[in-house]
Image (cartoon, rainbow, N blue to C red):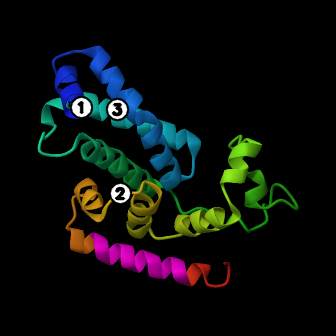
Amino acid sequence: MEARLAKLALKGDQRAFAELVELYQDKLFHMAYRMLNNRQEAEDIVQDTFLRVYKNLDKYDENLKFSTWIYRIATNLCIDRLRKRKPSYSLDAESSEHEGLDGYSMIPSDNRTPESEVLLTETQRIVHQAIETLPPKYKTIMMLRYIQDMSLQEIGDVLDMPVTTIKTRVHRGREFLRKKLEHKL
């Protein structure tokens, strides 16, 4: 279905492109938000992804699933954004400007509702926090595998890497997480 929409969009059908945006914007936002942990940056990534998709529709390889292609674009944009970030200060460190406050207390709320808070169990939060601390090459793969629920083959397609490399990084990512979570769970 997406390949058909992509073809129509390439021919100038704006409704088809709007349908692609509708299909993927939330999924891409959630993936970008998980990778970047920043709502504004995630929104920027989604917008940049659709701009790139629109500009490059003529380069879309129909042998690839459309979802693989669009996730590859979004994931690469997230990785680029992570690389450009300056090393950040520790959230545990007290702020010199705001006496008595640490970095966690200054993170803006993401407006969770009580219902969504219940759904996000303490264990999930701990695991998500641990994933956030992984080196980018493992973090990306662990996000795609366990949060986006992609198969090893799909991740390999998205990142343009052999499945054997993906398997190795999933294994190493799990090892990192196991060590980080040993004393927390």
Which of the 4 image quadrants contains residue 109? top right
Q: Residue 58: image x %, image y %?
A: 14, 30
Q: Which residues are magenta?
A: 166-178
Q: Please tell me whether mark 3 or mark 2 is closer to you in this view.
A: 2
First in sequence: mark 1 vs mark 3: 1
Residue drawn 52% across the image and 77% down it:
177
Three-letter code for the amino acid on which mark 2 is drawn: Met
Q: Is residue 18 in sight in this rendering?
A: yes
Three-letter code for the amino acid on which mark 1 is drawn: Met
Image position of 42 (left or right of 79): right
Image vertical order of residue 41 relative to residue 122, above or below: above
At numbered mark 1, what does the secondary structure look like: helix, strand or loop?
A: loop
Quadrant location, the C terminus: bottom right
Q: Which mark is residue 50?
A: 3
- Give the alpha-carbon distance from disc 3 to disc 2, as whole Å: 21 Å
Residue with the mark numbered 2: 150
Q: Residue 51: image x %, image y %?
A: 32, 30
Three-letter code for the amino acid on which mark 3 is drawn: Phe
At numbered mark 2, what does the secondary structure look like: helix, strand or loop?
A: loop
- Give the alpha-carbon distance from disc 2 to disc 1, as whole Å: 19 Å
